[in-house]
Amino acid sequence: MTFEEAITASEVYAKRNLLLGNGFSIACRPNIFTYHSLFEQADFSATPELAALFASLSSRDFELVIRTLNNAEKVLEVYDPDGQTLVNVREHQSALRELLIRTISENHPANPGDITEEEYRSCRQFLTHFIGADTQGKAFSVNYDLLLYWAVLHTLEDLPALPCRKTDGFGLTDGNLFWTGTQSARPACIYYPHGALHMFDTGTSITKLSPRRDGGPIVDQCRQHLEDGHFPMFVAEGTSLQKQTKISHNPFLFHASEQLQQAGKEADSCFFIYGHSLDSNDNHLLKAISKGNCGAIFISLHGDENSEANTAIRERAHGWAATRDPAFPLNVHFFDAATAHVWDAP
């Protein structure tokens, strides 16, 4: 299908929900947000072993390397529990997650103005199908960058403000935005179940950076936090179980995950999945859709629909449908990602 045809086909459902994968950010700035680009920009001088591991695996996938280190840790816990190599592997897992955060923040577009008005307009028009004034859907992003946040906050004279600018559970106190709990987050319709650059868990509170603060652009604020040794709230663990464990210990992330679970249970709804490979390392989120009650999924495919990556996506999606409870069948559809024009006008 084209995206327009998918939207038309989805009109039989009361609600459209949206799950955004890394393809959402790559479509905007491929020279920054692909794993290949991040690898090229990353500084491995402090941990050359990590660069060697990427080379050994013939991969630029940060999560794959983190998973590999996790598996190595499990092996060493059995074969060499008192050895220095086990200590190094554990330290390098943490170092690689921190390197990923630093690389994204240091190469991220510096200001919202680095995104053009035409790009914002296309993105906002895309989002209105799910979280517009006439819809009741929710959007979930597993991306760490600020692109979605900027698009939501951006004002366009010819487009109405998105309703997702309502409270999302963060309250303003002394010039800072603090998470105040799930009760105040009920009007929210955008969620970040893996965290993002503009969110920090200080250990005593969860804060959100805002461009309305006196601290300057969000990216600059984030870089200052990094210089002070504070890292954004990122779920960059290697396996789905590890990610779920981290989510469960953070009230904001847990709330976002719960909202995804709830959205997946609505039988009169459908899900659009854009820019996500359906990889098993996100099973803790994807099961809300695959094992839920939603009536249909519309999944974007980038490029040749018969490529190895797209074939894997199609097989996995049809596998979800095959294992669904017959009382809540899952209709599976695919659309051409390019026709969604998420960041470019048709």
Image (spheres, rainbow, N blue to C red):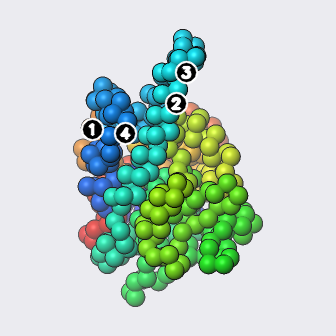
Q: Nearer the viewer, mark 4 or mark 1?
A: 4
Q: Secondary structure at mark 4?
A: loop
Q: Nearer the viewer, mark 3 or mark 1?
A: 3
Q: Which mark is residue 83?
A: none
Mark 3 or mark 4, earlier in chain = 4
**Closer-to-camera residue (275/81):** 81
Please give the residue where the numbered disc 4 appears in the rendered image: 46
State if disc 2 and disc 1 touch (CB < 8 Å).
no
Give SS at disc 1: loop
Instruction: Identify the residue under disc 3.
Output: 74
Residue 83 image offset from top left, x and y in percent: 53, 17
Sort mark 1 into few (<14), some (14-19) or many (20+) by Cα contacts within 10 Å. Answer: few
Sequence-earlier tag: 2 or 4: 4
Residue bearing the label numbered 2:
90
Question: Of label 1 and label 2, which has the lower sequence position?
Answer: 2
On the image, numbered disc 1 is attached to which residue?
306
